[in-house]
Image (spheres, coloured by chain):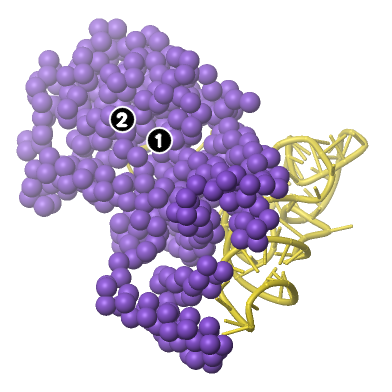
Amino acid sequence: MGLRIFNSLTRRKEEFTPLTPGEARMYVCGVTVYDISHIGHARSALVFDVIRRYLRFKGYRVQFVKNFTDVDDKIINRAAQEGVSSQEISERYIAEYRADMASLGVLPGDVEPKATEHIPQMIALIQRLIAKGLAYVVHGDVYFEVRRFPTYGRLSGKNLEDLLAGARVEVDDRKRDPRDFALWKSAKPGEPSWPSPWGAGRPGWHIECSAMSMQYLGESFDIHGGGEDLIFPHHECEIAQAEGASGKPFVRYWIHNGFVNFGDEKMSKSLGNTLTIRDLVARHDPEAMRLYLLGTHYRHPLEFGDERIGEAARALERLRGLRAEADRLAAKGTPPPGPDLGLFDEVTQHRSRFETAMDDDFNTPQALGAIFDLARRLQTARTDVSDGRGGAGAFLVGVGELMTVSRVLGLLEGRAPDAPEIDPARKARIESLVWLRQEARRARDFAEADRLRAELDQLGVVLEDTRDGTTWKVRR
RNA sequence: GGCGGCGUAGCCAAGUGGUUAAGGCGGAGGUCUGCAAAACCUCUAUUCAGCGGUUCGAAUCCGCUCGCCGCCUCCA
């Protein structure tokens, strides 16, 4: 069974057939770097991170490009506000973006091109469009002439007449048609600009993605993604530019993720600030955030709920408990496989369910269902091992499978789990109390043992008595 | 006005024509434990916003009603 992807262009699920067998070339619209990234950016980045990981899991050689828009009105405004250069703003927020993404375990792109570093490519593309009669120059501005590209509107399901009727575009006498969009904007005083055949200026927003994706992935490639808000006009314009110039189909599969909503709360600046990735990661385990965000299908809107992340964290603990147990067993040396009590068959079944779910348009909620069923089965196996019925080797193999599929979702990555730094003095005190309690229990002085446990509880320490001794952790 | 989406258990969320409506969180009972914790087991939607219709059969298709949301302008 092969991978099927919902293609925004056709509005249906289609079998994924890359242009080059065994390879998947994908371009994802990144961010305009003028501010700290928020939960919505996190969702989008996460969705495409998982798609990329899954393609790799399926054996494709993935070429993944994600751009930075680093020239734009918002950047210029911000720079003016702060009295610094646009470049300083964009560099700052590129660094912030990368830090935020790393904190979420989102892998960096193979290429992360910046618009300002591809001005020549954009100019060349605009020249091709002019040469083909699809664009025109007016006083140093260049516009794409939408009426010359009849399929404009196909991606967003609009027709040219409706666009004209509903056009709320600012009146601009220089355009031949209100629907036309800027490829190149002539320089205004105090704004960054580059020389061009039409005079100094800067690129329009849409041209960068066409130019950069074609440069790194070719004139036709497999997957182009972004938030659903980009369908119109951004991606519509990208298609017009790319196909207008090359005469070839631009992208085979368009993938768009749904939004994160905040209920009736306005997307006000103050609220927006509380929902930055930075803020959330400070309060929550990043893998719990991944688990939470992946619990809703990527095309569905997601109503943000802070408490949901805490719930996800509790679920994640179950998975981590298995990893910890496997680590403990593995530390004792390679165990013999031992009886598997049907474990292998069931592991295989769950893995296959995982794959079927992911093959169906990256259905991560369903895939997580398979993962949690697998985890429950492994917990049983864990009990079997400690009771001497099941083989430790079989258990370890099973946990290995769990890790393999979890990591496709970026879970159980092995990054600093949840152990916060504990200062040595506190740690020594905790361990001595734990030891004293062990002694008390051995002496069957349970009153004393319970007293010590209560004392540890005051210190925020949770105990777990196992057949191999007592483990403890600091409550989060 | 145009285009699109959503309404499934206490909460979150899959499922989109046919054996028991996934999974997570929460809750109840049980096993284990000196007691806990963790884990596991059992239970927690005769029912899928409402009303009609199509069908041998619908949460799933069609129509209407109610409620909510996104895009059409910068936006992940």
The residue that label 2 is drawn on is A110
The residue that label 1 is drawn on is A226
Image quadrant for the C terminus of chain A? bottom left
Callout 1: few (<14), some (14-19), or many (20+) C-alpha neighbours within 10 Å? many
Which residue sits at x=31%, y=47%?
A: A102
Which residue sits at x=67%, y=47%?
A: A339
Which residue sits at x=48%, y=26%?
A: A59
Amino acid tagged 1: Gly
- Residue A246 location, quadrant: top left
Could you tell me if residue A158 is visible in this image?
A: no
Which residue sits at x=25%, y=10%?
A: A128
Q: Which chain is purple?
A: A
Secondary structure of residue under mark 1: strand
Q: How far from the left and from the top, in percent, is residue A121?
A: 21, 18
Q: Is residue A335 above or below residue A386?
A: above
- Residue A220 location, quadrant: top left
Residue A91 as seen in the image, left or right of residue A16: left
Residue A390 as seen in the image, left or right of residue A159: right
Amino acid tagged 2: Asp
Q: Which chain is yellow?
A: B
Q: Is residue A36 above or below residue A407?
A: below
Q: What's the CA distance linking mark 1 and mark 2?
A: 17 Å
Chain letter of mark 2 equals: A
